[in-house]
Amino acid sequence: MTLDDDVVTGTVEPRADVAVRQADPPLLEVAGLRVQFRTARGPVTVLDGVDYQVHRGRTLAVVGESGSGKSVTARAIMGILPRTASIVGGSIRLAGVDLVRARESVRRAARGARVAMVFQDALSALNPVLPVGYQIVEGCRRKGGMSRAEGRRRAVELMDQVGIPAARARVGAFPHEFSGGMRQRVMIAMALARDPEVLIADEPTTALDVTIQAQILRLLADLQTQRNMGLVMITHDMGVVANTADEIAVMYAGRIVEQGSASEVFGTPAHPYTRALLGSIPRPELRGQRLPAIAGSPPDPSATPSGCPFRSRCPQAMPVCGTRPPVVRWRGPLPGSIGDEAGGLDARIGDETSSPRAEIGDEAGGLASDAGGAPGSGERMAACHLLTPGAQS
Amino acid sequence: MTAALRSGTPAPGPGEVVLRVADLVKTYPIRGALGGGGRGTLTAVDGVSLTLRRGQTLGLVGESGSGKSTVAKLLVAVERPTAGTIEVVGKPMHALTGSRLRRARRDIQLVFQDPYTSLDPRLTVADLVAEPLSIHPELVPRRRRAARIAELLDMVGLASGFADRLPHQLSGGQRQRVGIARALALQPSILVLDEPVSALDMSVQAQIVNLLTDLQDELGLSYVFIAHDLGVVAHVSDEIAVMYLGRIVERGTHDEVFGTPAHPFTMALLSAIPEPDPAARPHFGRRLLAGETPSPIALPSGCRFRTRCWRATEICAQTEPGLQAQESSPSHLAACHHPGASGGADERHP
């Protein structure tokens, strides 16, 4: 497309990448999180050992399909899992408190102002019979003993910050009087009311038109920079991921299958699922050709295959994939037999006929198997047998 | 299988126009609260003209409220036009009623966006695919139906074991295959695909896109492909029409519209699509549009895009621009007083 770059309309310059701060302790740390749902046919494990960290001023995109567990993880953090769900393992550390084990009062205090969530569907998340201004500051007024007048002032201020025009006049309006994009801004204002350190946005733009989506994504990025928040962007849209994320966690069937910096995961995807998914997105070069599609559908959480959950759809599945894949952490080039193929990666993505490669990479350096904790900056993680030397022997 | 499908209606010749829409208008009366009292009209589709050739795909893009789904309903005669003409394989759909309309409808079938809500949950896959055949019993004799259903399921890549399943036992992709099989049952020349992959898991979308392109090649189908996802539209479309508030604001070949967009709305739409490539991030939202689509019952004077357009001048408030051929190509049309590439480096949003 020949868009002349000098023409800028109502935009700010793209945010410069915040320098990686390794020393910063994470604001939020999820480790080994396991969640089960009680069903008529017995317990179903929907999260099977999820690890991630959220750092100040950074955006973590959690990407996955329906049923992958990306929203369940967020709900576990917020303490709003449905009654049929229970956390059966792992920890969620926020401000030094393990939200899984602490008493309810301690949990509430720890969550309090530190973490807030923006939901996908603002129309059903907002109360239709209360003015938006009231809803935006409801939390502050309850916790902070804020007066009605103060509350109103604060609501107007927050509505201004999220770009709702004529905030003073609209603070008393009801949700149905706002457009979809404006309702999403109201949701964001509500989430910001107590100045959270971590903001979790669950598919915040999925229901919106693309021009409005672009506005909301820009708003979230600007607010994050201004407030130096940690942002968790939950999405199924690889385009949204590429344009917002510092780090990416790719989820599949209740597990994180790959994690790393956005540029590295997009540049050299390691897990066959990530590679196939990126390969199946229409690109100009693929016009007129069949897309390299992934066979099958994501597994039903109640019937996830044993071992690697992707193996039934994986073009490179091997007998060993029937056992749980190792969590491999590394820096630099891709390890294992995936690394050997990296050169011809594009040609092989999603190619259903390609057979598992016979060679085993004997990668030097940087390969450490299954250490605890989520990867820090620069480190990458993926859970796949192809990343271990000798897996195929 | 291909021969059987084509045997019903004589297939139009290659490259022939199978769909010709001219000056299509659809208005709806606006009712007051609780349905009482008329309060004017809403013009959902306002003078849309399109042509589609055999074996080709027309991509129809626009945002919610642009009228693209109303166009889809008009094309398949679920809604009837207020004005304008729709010719489907030479037949004037807009003027037909009764049994003639019923017969003409066989040529143009709709595939719905959401395969979760568009299939009757109590019917088996075989029943669902049989339904159009019992509505149009003249097409396939009763004794041939079972074979025809098996053939249709095979065409959309569903094994025969699926025939007895219920929709809730199917994945989203499988359901959409059933939706496509239903649409194909009547041997149409044209499929109107209303966001056919938007509701599907991302790892499944490419399968359905491939199925649609394969079926098009095999059966010589023509598609009207409606979507807000320009990536998929760009992949499948030969021609593109961009709608804004009931009007087509730009129309042209794939390369014209994506390569040298002429209308500012098209440019903004293209720049708002997040590309799945972090290297493209600096270009994202470069033309971030201010504001939102105005209400269709309170349209601005003149050009309906001017309230969000950075090129708007006095004339844009006075005269509504018509679709004009661009200098570069007679097939590339745009409805804009200031079309084409940059008007200068100092161009800014008002």
Image: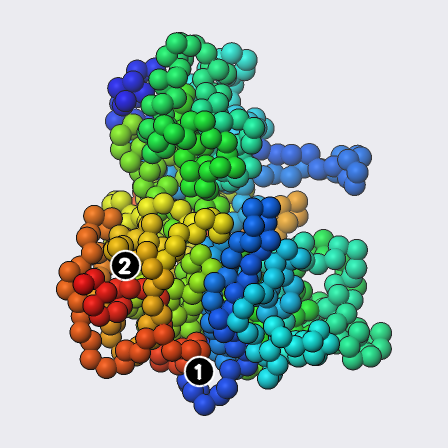
Disc 2 marks a residue whose amino acid type is: Val
Residue under label 1, please give it: A18
Query: Of callouts 2 and 1, which one flags the residue occurring earlier in the amino acid sequence?
Result: 1
Apparent side of residue B3 relative to residue A377 in the rendered image (left or right): left
Subunit ID for the residue under disc 2: A
Task: Give the crowd class for mark 2: few <14, some 14-19, many >=20 residues within 10 Å.
Answer: some
* The C terminus of chain B sits in image quarter: bottom right
Asked whether A275 or B99 is in front, the reply is A275
- Place of residue A208 in the rendered image (x, y in percent of width and height, measured from the top left): 55, 55
| Secondary element at image label 1 | loop
Within-10-Å neighbours for mark 1: few <14, some 14–19, many 20+: few
Does the rendering let one see residue A86?
Answer: yes
| Amino acid residing under circle 1 | Val
- Tell me what residue is drawn at x 44 percent, y 56 percent: A253
Q: Are marks 2 and 1 on the same chain?
A: yes
Specify whether B9 is left or right of A336: right
User: x%, y% of residue A317?
Assistant: 27, 54
x, y (%) of residue A59?
Answer: 48, 74
Q: Residue at x 43, y 32 (%)?
A: B178
Q: Nearer the viewer, residue B292 or B312?
A: B292
Helix, strand or loop at disc 2?
helix
Q: Position of residue B298 (x, y in %)?
A: 66, 48
